[in-house]
Image (tube, helix red, strand yellow):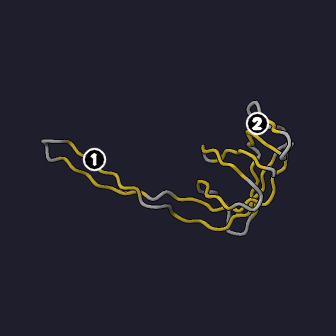
Amino acid sequence: MSYAIFTTGGCQFRAEPGVTIKVPLLAAKPGDEVSFDQVLLASDGKTVQTGAPKVKGAKVTAEVVRHGKGKKIRIFRFARRSGYRRKAGHRQDFTEIKIADVKVG
């Protein structure tokens, strides 16, 4: 089973062929093919290659499934004995991708 650890948007993700994952928002339309060459670790099932900092020749290709927003995060700021209260919310944008292929360099 081949897999790879790649980075995008400042986060690291584990990619296996056929798996769907959510990554930070990408500038691509649903149905487009995207590739990630910032592979930190790659395995073909028998050997594991680690990069310093990247694995040469390794690549992860995926198809964009959809864009969306995550669950709402509640932010509440409070200062005791002063009557200070602030309530806000945030929903992080994401792109859902389906991993098509993992190439090990």
- At x 77% / y 34%, what residue is drawn? 51
Instruction: Please state which amino acid type lies under the numbered disc 1.
Output: Arg
Q: Considering only vertical position in the picture, is 37 above or below 74?
A: above
Q: Residue furthest top?
A: 52
Q: Position of residue 70 (x, y in %)?
A: 50, 61
Name the residue located 81 percent from the left edge and 52 percent from the top edge.
1
Check the picture and name the quadrant holding the C terminus. Answer: top right
Q: Label 1, secondary structure: give it.
A: strand
Q: Position of residue 95 (x, y in %)?
A: 61, 60
Residue 46 quadrant: top right
Above or below, comparing residue 13 to residue 91 in the picture: above
Residue 3 at x, y percent in the picture: 77, 49
Please provide percent x and percent y for residue 27: 65, 58
Distance between mark 1 and mark 2 Cα atoms: 40 Å
| Residue contact at pointers 1 and 2, CB within 8 angstroms | no
The local secondary structure at tag 2 comes to: loop
Res. 54 mark: 2
Label 2 is placed on what type of residue?
Answer: Lys
Disc tally is 2
Label 1 neighbour load within 10 Å: few <14, some 14-19, many 20+: few
Q: Is residue 95 left or right of residue 16?
A: left
Decide which of tag 1 and tag 2 comes sooner along the chain: 2
Q: Residue at x 45, y 59 (%)?
A: 91
Residue wearing tag 1 = 77
Q: Specify whether 90 is left or right of 105.
A: left
